[in-house]
Amino acid sequence: MGENMKSKVSRTCLALTATIFLGISLFVSDAAAFGNGNGVEAKNAVQSWDMTWSGQVDDRVQIRVQNRNARVRVLSGQSVRGASSNFRSSLPRRNVNVRVNKRDGRGDVRVIEQPSSRNNYTALIEIYDDKGGSDNYRFELTWDGGGYNDYPNQPNRPDYSGNADMTWQGRVDDRVRVTVRGRNASARALSGRQPTQVRSNFRNQLPRNNVRVDVRKRDGRGSVRVIQQPSSSNNYSAVVEIYDSNGGDDFYSFELNWDQGYGNDRPDYGNNYGQGMTWSGSVDDVVRISIRGNRVSSRIISGQSLRNERFDINKTLTRQNLNVRVDKRSGRGSVRVIQQPRSSNNYTAVIEIRDSKGGRDDYRIEADW
């Protein structure tokens, strides 16, 4: 092959190599910039976070973010491994709105407290992994200046769904009742500590007629239910009960909505609306619970002693032939009504809990009549 031909082939190979290299470089650059097809959005998404966190989580963990610090607290499960945080900006000491974007992890990641003067401008993030074992989690936080007011009953506090008539939030230990009347909400602890960090927000006033109130729980590990509907007998108040039986406190939030269409045509439930009795305790084998009037007593049929027994009577079991129903909320065994109130047993209802698995288990039941 002549020198001219060799030189021409060499130049052609060099040009082809340069073209391939340039194409690969452009492809890699475009892929990094465009991500899933929108380069501007992907680039902005990468640069938009104010703080990132990663770690290996088992069960339930809370991360407390303040200024440029992120402290980890394990609520249940094994200790967090490989925890790491990176701040692009400091969490400011004002009422910003913190948002979370989960990048990795099979469970839930959510903001359960927004920064305010009441918590020294701290954001509280909770990770809940209930799949068994641990998993790697990574999330991003962003914040802006459009947060909420420090005080309850202000219209610029965030609403959970945008259309709730009323929202409530607070930290609850054991059992709390929230009484709603007009545009006021008062919380009272029936057992455990008084609720803290309580806030409420009304979009509409609870009217002074027989409306039907429905509750939707947004946060919290226990139960939230309406135990009294508004009526003339309770000065048109709705009563919501929060029951947390897991030990220690937890963050709860719920929404209330009421139907304006019932008016005075809805039946007046009075104070007897809702469950007649709630009961909880740690049971080994067989226990019987007797209800007579407004009194509750328990008797061990077999097994070890009853522990952590608690009960609450919401209405009296009257001296007539009633049909008592029981609903098991937690517990691995069976729960049933074995005696209905009749004249032959002095109008006493008897509920039997039978746990045959060996050892104790925690039970919670609701009875109504």
Image: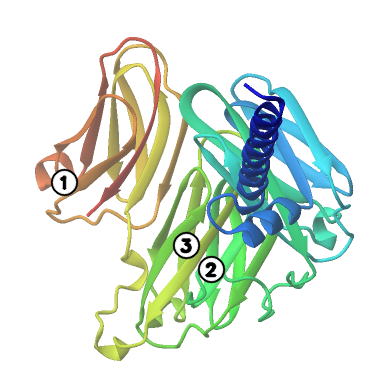
Residue drawn where x is 55% and y is 34% of the image: 105
Instruction: Determine the CA span between mark 3 and mark 2.
Output: 6 Å
Tell me if mark 1 has few (under 14), some (14-19) or many (20+) residues whose alpha carbon lies within 10 angstroms of its own: many
Whether residues under marks 3 and 2 lie with C-beta atoms below 8 angstroms apart, the answer is: no
Q: Can residue 249 be seen here?
A: no
Who is closer to the viewer here, 362 or 143?
A: 143
Q: Amino acid at mark 3?
A: Val
Residue 330 point in image, percent of width and height = 35, 34
Q: Secondary structure at mark 2?
A: strand
Q: Establish if 24 lies above or below 205.
A: above
Please report contact status of discs 1 and 2: CB closer than 8 Å, yes or no.
no
> Crowding at label 2, few (<14), some or many (≥20) Cα neighbours within 10 Å?
some
For label 3, count other residues whose C-alpha is less than 10 Å away and answer few (under 14), some (14-19) or many (20+).
many
Note whether 271 is above or below 35 in the view shown. Answer: below
Please, what is the three-letter code of the amino acid marked with disc 1? Answer: Pro
Badge 1 is on which residue?
341
Residue placed under numbered mark 3 in the picture: 240
Q: Which residue is mark 2?
A: 179
